[in-house]
């Protein structure tokens, strides 16, 4: 009897297990889950709706979606793509819908449907909940809370990205990339918070670096949020951690080139010469945001458009292009967050996801140093890597004479 153990019954562990049940039904499969329920986090993903993958139509290069692990994802997606994800769940009766923002969800809008589908795929496997593995041995044994140390022929680590969970790898000499948070919102200095509730399509960057992101920006009571900020937090995750989450932030409000911004402003001023500058506003900005920006330029609220001279035009253009604030910290609450860092991919065989130094040990999901921006890309990494591990284990044991 081939004995396979999976540590962690989250997205990657459950998906790996469900595929192993199908590919290698003769194996005995045990999943160890520290929490009281399997896939508790998966049930919360996408605000309880589970954004299970992305069509990838909105990204120009894989690096845009995967700031860490781009090359690995290229190979893993060849083996199990976003289309394969959709097919896998649809074949098991889950109806899916594609949103305008390229994100795939179950039509039921219920993450529990994904959880239930995976649990069905795991039928025949043993799931031991409230069972935290404290240590892995080089002989593929696992140390359990009851003091036992069962051994396996293949062991898959899918414990996710939470930094405290890496201690089970102690003593295995597996190199780790220091884990730091990714996908968080920014707390900022006071001025912009006066605009709480405002949404704008903008581009944000960290001056002095090449980190920049585009998309909807949301001003909150504590600072800045929205897809543009979450993306920037992902691209600059390691840099911001090194800076203690304190850095300058520039907002480019119209997302247009300097020339286009200037000409938009000229057109606006020429179209409404007798009106107050604050009573008109460029397309894409709300009246409230425009009023705030003109005040930030020190302009009188009753200034008419035909009174705006070249110095003021330059000031306004400059403000629209580089409105600078200070990031004072990060706010991980109520938002999706993942970990940047984890098991160094250099320690893992790219073709099989097996540990290079401990035969029979595999990694999948967020425990690896692969992570993505929001939009279903993180779960896709979990599905693709878990599928690869299931295939690798199946191939390994299919060639061993039984
Ligand atoms: C609130 C929130 C919403 C999200 N929404 C989305 C979304 O909509 N789309 C998307 O693509 N991504 C989303 N993500 C990210 C996504 O959930 C993760 O990238 C994904 O769950 C990673 O899967 P995983 O299996 O590697 O890790 P996890 O899902 O974290 O699973 C790891 C499992 O291992 C268990 N475990 C850990 N250590 C041990 C141990 N020593 N012994 C036994 N068990 C252990 C844990 O309890 C856990 O159940 C979201 C994240 C959060 C926090």
Image (tube, grey):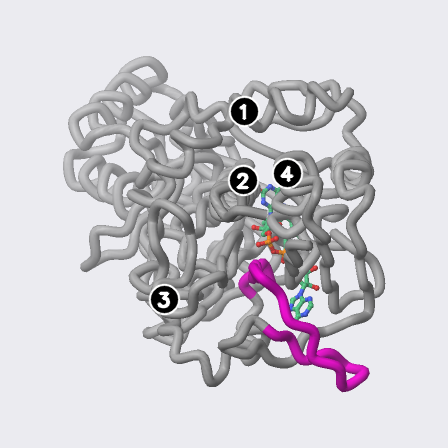
Q: Nearer the viewer, mark 4 or mark 3?
A: 4
Q: Which residue is mark 3?
A: 240
Q: Which badge, 4 or 3, is on the more N-terminal residue?
A: 4
333 relative position to 227: left or right: right
* Residue contact between numbered discs 4 and 2, judged by CB atoms under 8 Å: yes
The image position of residue 315, as x and y in percent, is 23, 44
Q: Residue at x 61, y 74 (%)?
A: 141
Given residues 141 and 297, the one toward you in this image is: 141
* Residue contact between numbered discs 1 and 2, judged by CB atoms under 8 Å: yes
Q: Which residue is mark 2?
A: 387
Separation of marks 2 and 3 at Cα, in angstroms: 33 Å
* SS state under label 1: helix
Label 3: few (<14), some (14–19) or many (≥20) C-alpha neighbours in 10 Å: many
The image position of residue 26, as x and y in percent, is 70, 43
Q: Residue at x 72, y 53 (%)?
A: 28
Q: Which residue is mark 4?
A: 19
166 relative position to 9: left or right: left
Q: Is residue 146 magenta?
A: yes
Q: Is residue 139 above or below residue 375?
A: below
Q: Which residue is mark 1?
A: 84
- Is the residue marked 3 within 8 Å of ligand 1, measured from its CB? no
Furthest-front residue in this view: 401
Residue 383 visible at all: yes
Q: Is residue 9 magenta?
A: no
Given residues 153 and 166, the one toward you in this image is: 153
Which region of the structure is painted magenta? 141-161
Q: Which badge, 1 or 4, is on the more N-terminal residue?
A: 4
């Amino acid at each position: 009897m081939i004995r396979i153990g999976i540590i962690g019954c989250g997205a990657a562990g459950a998906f790996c297990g469900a595929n192993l049940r199908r590919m290698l039904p003769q194996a005995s499969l045990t999943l160890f889950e520290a929490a009281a329920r399997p896939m508790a986090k998966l049930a919360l993903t996408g605000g309880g709706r589970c954004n299970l993958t992305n069509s990838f139509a909105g990204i120009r290069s894989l690096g845009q979606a995967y700031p860490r692990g781009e090359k690995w994802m290229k190979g893993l997606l060849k083996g199990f793509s976003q289309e394969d994800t959709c097919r896998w769940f649809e074949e098991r009766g889950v109806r899916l819908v594609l949103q305008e923002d390229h994100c795939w969800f179950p039509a039921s809008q219920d993450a529990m449907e994904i959880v239930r589908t995976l649990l069905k795929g795991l039928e025949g496997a043993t799931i031991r909940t409230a069972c935290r593995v404290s240590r892995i041995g080089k002989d593929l044994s696992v140390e359990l809370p009851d003091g036992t140390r069962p051994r396996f022929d293949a062991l898959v680590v899918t414990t996710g990205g939470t930094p405290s969970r890496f201690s089970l790898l102690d003593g295995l000499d597996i190199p780790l990339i220091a884990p730091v948070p990714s996908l968080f919102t920014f707390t900022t200095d006071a001025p912009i918070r006066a605009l709480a509730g405002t949404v704008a399509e903008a581009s944000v960057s960290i001056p002095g670096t090449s980190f920049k992101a585009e998309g909807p920006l949301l001003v909150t009571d504590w600072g800045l949020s929205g897809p543009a900020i979450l993306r920037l937090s992902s691209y600059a995750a390691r840099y911001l951690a090194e800076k203690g989450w304190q850095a300058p932030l520039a907002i480019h409000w119209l997302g247009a080139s300097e020339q286009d911004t200037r000409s938009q402003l000229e057109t606006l001023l020429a179209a409404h010469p007798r009106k107050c500058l604050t009573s008109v506003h460029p397309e894409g900005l709300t009246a409230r945001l425009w009023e705030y920006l003109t005040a930030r330029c020190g302009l009188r609220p009753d200034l008419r458009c035909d009174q705006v001279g070249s110095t003021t035009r330059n000031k306004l253009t400059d403000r629209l292009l580089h409105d600078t604030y200070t990031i004072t910290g990060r706010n991980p609450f109520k938002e999706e967050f993942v970990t940047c860092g984890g098991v160094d991919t250099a320690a893992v065989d790219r073709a099989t996801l097996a540990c290079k130094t401990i035969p029979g040990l595999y990694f999948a999901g967020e425990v690896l140093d692969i992570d993505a921006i929001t939009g279903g890309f993180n779960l896709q990494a979990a599905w693709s890597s878990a599928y690869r591990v299931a295939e690798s284990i199946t191939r390994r044991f299919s060639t061993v004479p039984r």
